[in-house]
């Protein structure tokens, strides 16, 4: 076997693989042995028909496709390994056979999408927005309030009108142009006021109602409402309030603090502030790093193979699916609701995907240009840190690690060093001043 690699258009390479007649004969025989049981010929037991008989009966090229697959499977990976310093395949190749294919001229051509080279402009000495998020006393109070709200006890309300935050058990009938419409009626429906789950104006109209009251609430459907016949239309809902359920918040006292794992309200408040400050620091770092790459990428260019964009789109679609799943919604149901197909919805991520792929390529290119590396000592320190978090000795922990975990750690160290370098070598200005 011999092969030749030539650059092709749109970040692909063409690998032309030529096999000897002896290699082809061997592959054909292997294909015959592996597949002969699939064919039957009168006068022979199934699986025992000689190769030349099958070829006479079904055609000379009966095992050609499988033989080519065998040769491809045996040699393609070895070629990629041998050429790893020249290019990196980023997707499956498009395969074809060479012109004038015969048992004496066996040529397999693989058009391979490869990681593109990136042309990067200036990446030092430029003005870049830096994000800084701080935590105020009001932020801490709001977070503690949210926790108390989640731990609130439900209580039936009988002595006051409905308020935002209450759960109202209602009957309602909606009419547009004096006629009821599909989906506009329900009995015994539990609606949390302020949830925004109904069209604008409905929940606000329920606020102030008293138990047993019947009220007409006028609303206007949004222009982008999913039902075509109701877009922008006025309607009236007749609402009957049967029951109100409110919340009784737990007192912010020592008993509450102990439930949250602290000895006092002061200790709990400090713990909440520490967590919020960590989140703020993480958000500041993430947005600043994204700002850095966004600014540098403005002068970068690359011919990105479609397979890389498609893969990023699929990842975005999966993230959306997981997010909906946590809300108790199936992606297929959501797509039916918005009138889209899976492929159409995935396509909507394409511009975002192109940007994400280009940003990743820019990061990798600058790491290469600046010769940024991760030393064995740095990798070992990270491994030891992870081992400590799970109560293991570093040596024991490392033995059980997948090579991809070590690769991830190495890459994480490089990326951290890169952004330290970029912050130190650019003019970082507060985001609002840019």
Image: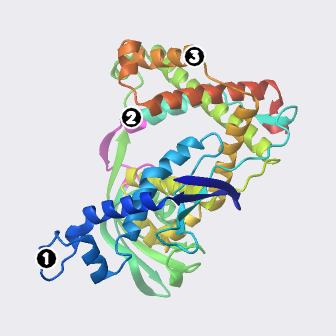
Q: Quick one: 323 or 350, which is closer to the camera?
A: 350
Magenta region includes residue 52: no
Closer to the chain start, of discs 2 and 1, is: 1
Q: What is the secondary structure assignment of the residue under circle 2?
A: loop
Task: Report the front residue among 326 and 222.
Answer: 326
Foreground: 68 or 131? 68
Camera-near label (1 vs 3) is: 1
248 sits to left or right of 50: right
Residue at the outermost right position:
125
* Magenta highlight range: 148-167
As drawn, the label of residue 123 is none
Location of mark 3 (residue): 378
Q: Residues within 10 Å of mark 2 (few under 14, many from 20)?
A: some
* Residues at marks 1 and 3, CA–CA distance in whole angstroms: 67 Å
Which residue sits at x=60%, y=30%? Answer: 282
Residue 278 is situated, as x and y percent measured from the top left of the image, at 57, 25
- Residue 44, label in figure: 1
Image quarter for residue 310?
A: bottom right
Going 57% across and 69% down the picture, which residue do you hit?
Answer: 98
**Which residue has dot 2 on it?**
249
Q: Residue at x 55, y 46 (%)?
A: 80
Q: Find the distance from the CA under tag 2 to the CA under tag 1.
A: 84 Å
Q: In the rendered image of this protein, does residue 381 appear above or below residue 426?
A: above
């Amino acid at each position: 076997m011999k092969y030749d690699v030539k650059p092709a258009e749109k970040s692909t390479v063409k690998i032309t693989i030529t096999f000897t007649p002896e290699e082809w004969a061997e592959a054909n025989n292997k294909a015959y042995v592996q597949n002969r049981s699939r064919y039957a010929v009168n006068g022979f037991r199934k699986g025992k028909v000689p190769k030349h008989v099958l070829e006479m009966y079904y055609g000379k090229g009966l095992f050609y496709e499988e033989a080519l697959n065998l040769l491809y499977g045996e040699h393609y990976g070895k070629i990629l390994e041998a050429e790893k310093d020249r290019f990196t395949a980023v997707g499956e190749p498009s395969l074809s056979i060479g012109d004038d294919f015969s048992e004496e001229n066996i040529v397999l051509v693989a058009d391979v999408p490869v990681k593109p080279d990136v042309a990067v402009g200036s990446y030092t000495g430029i003005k870049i927005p830096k994000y800084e998020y701080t935590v105020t006393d009001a932020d801490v109070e709001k977070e503690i309030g949210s926790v108390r709200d989640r731990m609130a006890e439900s209580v039936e309300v009988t002595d006051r009108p409905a308020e935002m935050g209450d759960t109202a058990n209602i009957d309602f009938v909606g009419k547009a142009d004096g006629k009821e419409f599909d989906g506009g009626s329900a009995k015994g429906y539990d609606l949390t006021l302020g949830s925004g789950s109904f069209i604008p104006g409905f929940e606000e109209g329920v606020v102030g109602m008293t138990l047993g009251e019947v009220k007409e609430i006028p609303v206007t459907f949004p222009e982008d409402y999913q039902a075509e016949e109701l877009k922008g239309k006025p309607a009236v809902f007749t609402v009957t309030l049967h029951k109100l359920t409110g919340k009784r918040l737990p007192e912010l006292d020592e008993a509450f603090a102990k439930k949250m794992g602290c000895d006092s309200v002061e200790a709990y408040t400090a713990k909440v502030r520490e967590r919020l400050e960590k989140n703020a620091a993480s958000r500041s770092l993430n947005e600043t790093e994204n700002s850095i790459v966004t600014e540098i990428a403005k002068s970068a260019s690359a011919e990105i193979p479609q397979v890389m964009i498609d893969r990023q789109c699929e990842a975005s679609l999966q993230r959306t699916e997981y997010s909906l799943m946590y809300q108790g919604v199936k992606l297929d149901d959501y797509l039916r609701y918005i009138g889209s197909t899976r492929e159409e919805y995935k396509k909507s991520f394409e511009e975002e995907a192109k940007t994400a792929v280009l940003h990743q390529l820019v990061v990798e290119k600058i790491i290469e240009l600046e010769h940024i590396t991760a030393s064995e000592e740095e990798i070992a320190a990270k491994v030891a840190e992870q081992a400590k978090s799970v109560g293991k000795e570093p040596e024991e922990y490392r033995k059980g690690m997948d090579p991809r975990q070590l690769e991830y750690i190495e890459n994480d160290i490089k990326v951290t060093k890169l952004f330290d370098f970029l912050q130190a070598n650019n003019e970082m200005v507060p985001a609002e001043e840019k």
